[in-house]
Image (tube, rainbow, N blue to C red):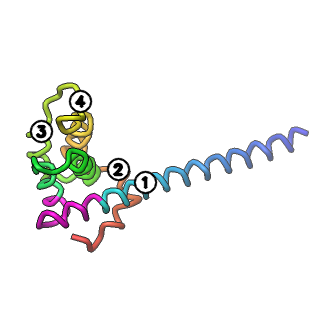
Amino acid sequence: MWRNFKKWTVRISAILLITLLALISVAELMIGSGVRRFSQIAQEQFPGDRVRALVAMVECESCDLRDRNHAVWALGQLADHRALPVLEKYYTGEKCDHLHKICQYELKKALRLARSGYNSEAFLWRWMLRGQD
């Protein structure tokens, strides 16, 4: 009886671990896909590599606010120090006003990642961006 309990406990634990790893992998691949998609949208409108195009989109006052917020998010995920000046320019630390201004919460996260220069979660999707700049 005790042996069966141990066996089932190990099996259930293994299944839960595999499921958790699979969910994390899927989520990370979705993030990479989003970064690639928003980068491509920015590069269609603005010249340069993905970071420069996303920076230009953030600064584009005539661009849709949703697109600018997506660009901020993508810059944060890329964790590139070249994005720091524009992220710092728009970060005020005030309460978010999603109807009129770029999301301060996303700017804060993007700044943290860009300052560190490293996104530890990006290792699962960074390969998706190779050769596209």
Left or right: 12, with 27 as reference point:
right
Q: Alpha-carbon distance for marks 4 and 3?
A: 12 Å
Residue at position x 35%, y 56% in the image: 34
Residue count near mark 3 (Cα–Cα under 10 Å), binned few <14, some 14–19, many ≥20: some
Residue count near mark 4 (Cα–Cα under 10 Å), binned few <14, some 14–19, many ≥20: some
Disc 4 vs disc 3: which is toward the camera?
Answer: 4
The kind of secondary structure element at disc 4 is loop
Q: Give the extent of the magenta segment.
A: 38-53
Where residue 133 appears, as percent x and y from the top left, is: 21, 70
Residue at position x 91%, y 39% in the image: 1
Foreground residue, 68 or 55?
A: 68
Query: Of label 2 and label 4, which has the lower sequence position?
Result: 4
Foreground residue, 117 or 26?
A: 26
Query: Of label 1 and label 2, which has the lower sequence position?
Result: 1
Q: Disc number at residue 90? A: 3
Pointers 1 and 2 in contact (C-beta within 8 Å): no
Q: Which residue is mark 1?
A: 28
The picture quadrant where one finds residue 116 is top left
